[in-house]
Amino acid sequence: MGNPGRTPVGKRVGRVAALVVLVALTATGCSGDEILRFGWPVGVTPQANDMRWLWTWTVIAALAVGVIVWALIFWTATFHRKKKTAPGEEEELPRQFQYNIPLELFTVVVPTIMVCVLFFFTATTESKVLDKKPNPDVTVDVIAFQWNWEFKYEGDKAKRADGGQVSTVGSSGEIPLLVLPTNKTIEYKLRSTDVIHSFWVPEFHFKRDVMPDPEKNNQDFSFQNSIDREGSFVGRCAELCGTYHSVMNFEVRALSPDKYDQYIQLRTQTNPKTGKPNTASEALTAMNCGELCSPFAVTTKPFNTDRTARTATN
Ligand SMILES: [Cu+2]
């Protein structure tokens, strides 16, 4: 029976829901892009962007399914509850739907299709992210060891006067800088000299274990990406690898291709003051290009690894 002067329940629920959505969108001060990210962090590679769109569409699909399911639950609970038909009569159960073959087929077939669609888009995104070009512009050997990193550049451009290749090694006093060019295909070849480590740059949205014997372990130890903007991005070891695992950090310094070429060239040259090839910090200092050429890491700093200062309390 209608109740004059009052809005029907369905309409009221609809209005409250619309108000909640409106407040959520306006009060949080999020931009359209931020809303569509659904919490996905901003990445710096096209690969990270591919993964971001997979996430966005997956959340939209999940929300659409959620809204339909919630609507059906509220609709059933509100309009199809046990009710009395007349005063004094026994309560009557709503119409029952068990053993309804078409309905049961529907609830099996539709979720199966949804899982297949999600699988398809996940697999295509994964193959895009892991795709490798035959001739990358830059190849860098990433050598992990307890507890630091060495980055060795391959190719003739990175050949020093003394015949060796340009390489950067971290120490307990200095965070190693992995200087890379923007908008170029970079190949990372990962290898460990001791235990299993893991190469992780959060802004790449990519992490891969660094194995001592990748071939024996049947591991694909290389991957490629490109970096779409200049900047400094922290890198970390993401596999518990012993006492100083937590201090095993590095920094990716992405420079424009011109600046990168200048950097590599400086690294191949000998420093007249020291008689040795320029170090990463010497090359960056010589380039003098502001924050981007900061000679030391800006995203993290070395930790004090001296444990001799500590004494047992009992
Ligand atoms: Cu490690």
Image (tube, helix red, strand yellow):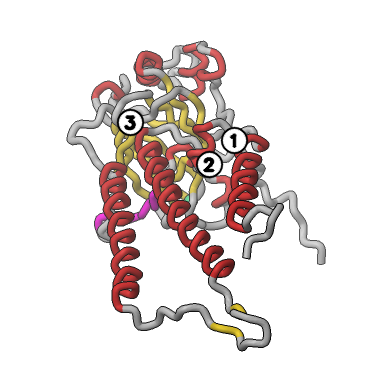
- Residue holding disc 2: 249
Point out which mark residue 165 bears. none
Side of 98 relative to 156 (left or right):
right
Q: Amino acid at mark 1?
A: Thr
Near mark 1 (Cα within 10 A), the count class, few <14, some 14-19 or many ≥20, is: some
Q: Is residue 190 above or below residue 137?
A: below
Residue at the spot 55% in from the left edge and 20% down from the top edge: 294
- Which x, y percent locates residue 299? 58, 32
Image quarter (top left, top right, bottom left or bottom right) of the N terminus: bottom right
Tell me where the magenta segment starts and ends, as one range: 208-215
- Residue holding disc 1: 300
- Which x, y percent locates residue 200? 45, 44
Residue at the spot 56% in from the left edge and 64% down from the top edge: 74
Q: Amino acid at mark 3?
A: Tyr
**How far is the residue under mark 3 from the one under mark 1?**
23 Å
Near mark 2 (Cα within 10 A), the count class, few <14, some 14-19 or many ≥20, is: many
**How far is the residue under mark 1 from the one under mark 2?**
8 Å
- Which x, y percent locates residue 107? 35, 70
- Residue holding disc 3: 153
